[in-house]
Image (cartoon, coloured by chain):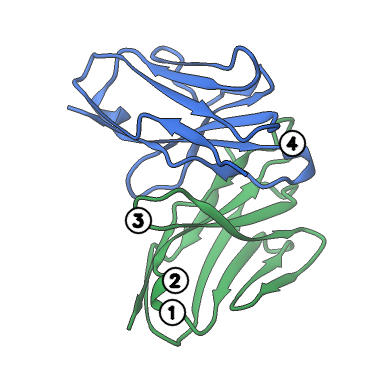
Chain colours: A green, B blue
Amino acid sequence: GENVEQHPSTLSVQEGDSAVIKCTYSDSASNYFPWYKQELGKRPQLIIDIRSNVGEKKDQRIAVTLNKTAKHFSLHITETQPEDSAVYFCAARLMDSSYKLIFGSGTRLLVRP
Amino acid sequence: EAGVAQSPRYKIIEKRQSVAFWCNPISGHATLYWYQQILGQGPKLLIQFQNNGVVDDSQLPKDRFSAERLKGVDSTLKIQPAKLEDSAVYLCASSLDPGVLNEQFFGPGTRLTVL
């Protein structure tokens, strides 16, 4: 079946450094790629998303890039802060009748003060 | 606006017992999702409703799991009988219409522990 692979599973960076999380997807027809942040014990929340008609999107310190040819997309966080520590999930939307999201396995980001 | 509500927040049961979870989506959201999130993994879709009809339940273990959304608003997810491997957080989410790239909003989840 369709799947989304996410790497790395854990990432530790020094405050102020950049963090990059990468995902690959299998459904070449996918056209929507959201990123969710889940803090410990809390619900996943959308932080940024990208549609297949653009290659990059930025929102302050976070950005997402998409390479449709290679079927991969990445989350970039610059000037990391301790409050960025959380689990980040990428997802890809299937282009069947359900339009359901397939989630990656998550990346636990730790920002060291 | 009010978010997605779920109850209970925590549940501990013994294997072979039954359990039910409740979800109230954001008002006006036609699409409702139930996800299972096992520790250390991403959310896995169990069932998706559009109003009160099932759109996708391909990953729902139908021998023990059931879900309904009778009036197209609230939904319940039931497990009977529970197994140890059902221990997970069960997340409910809702969106306006997945076909137009609307955001999915998640509830706080129900953490189920099966002993």
**Mark 3 residue element:** loop
**Mark 1 residue element:** loop
**Number of residues whose C-alpha sits closer than 10 Å to that of mark 3, classed few (under 14), some (14–19) or many (20 or more):** few
Q: Are marks 3 and 2 in contact (CB under 8 Å)?
A: no
Residue B7 image-quadrant placement: top left
Kindly identify which chain the residue marked by label 2 belongs to. Answer: A
Horizontal side, residue B14 vs residue B93: left or right: left
Q: Are marks 1 and 2 in contact (CB under 8 Å)?
A: yes
**Number of residues whose C-alpha sits closer than 10 Å to that of mark 4, classed few (under 14), some (14–19) or many (20 or more):** some
Q: Are marks 4 and 2 in contact (CB under 8 Å)?
A: no
Labels 3, 1: one chain = yes
Horizontal side, residue A43 vs residue A41: left or right: right
Residue A37 locus on image (x, y percent): 49, 59
Give the residue pinned by disc 3. Answer: A40
Labels 4, 2: one chain = no
Give the residue pinned by disc 4. Answer: B97
Labels 1, 2: one chain = yes
Residue B29 locus on image (x, y percent): 68, 33
Residue A84: numbered disc? 2
Q: Quadrant of the N terminus of chain A?
A: top right
Give the residue pinned by disc 1. Answer: A81
Q: Residue at x 73, y 61 (%)?
A: A68
Amino acid residing under circle 4: Asp
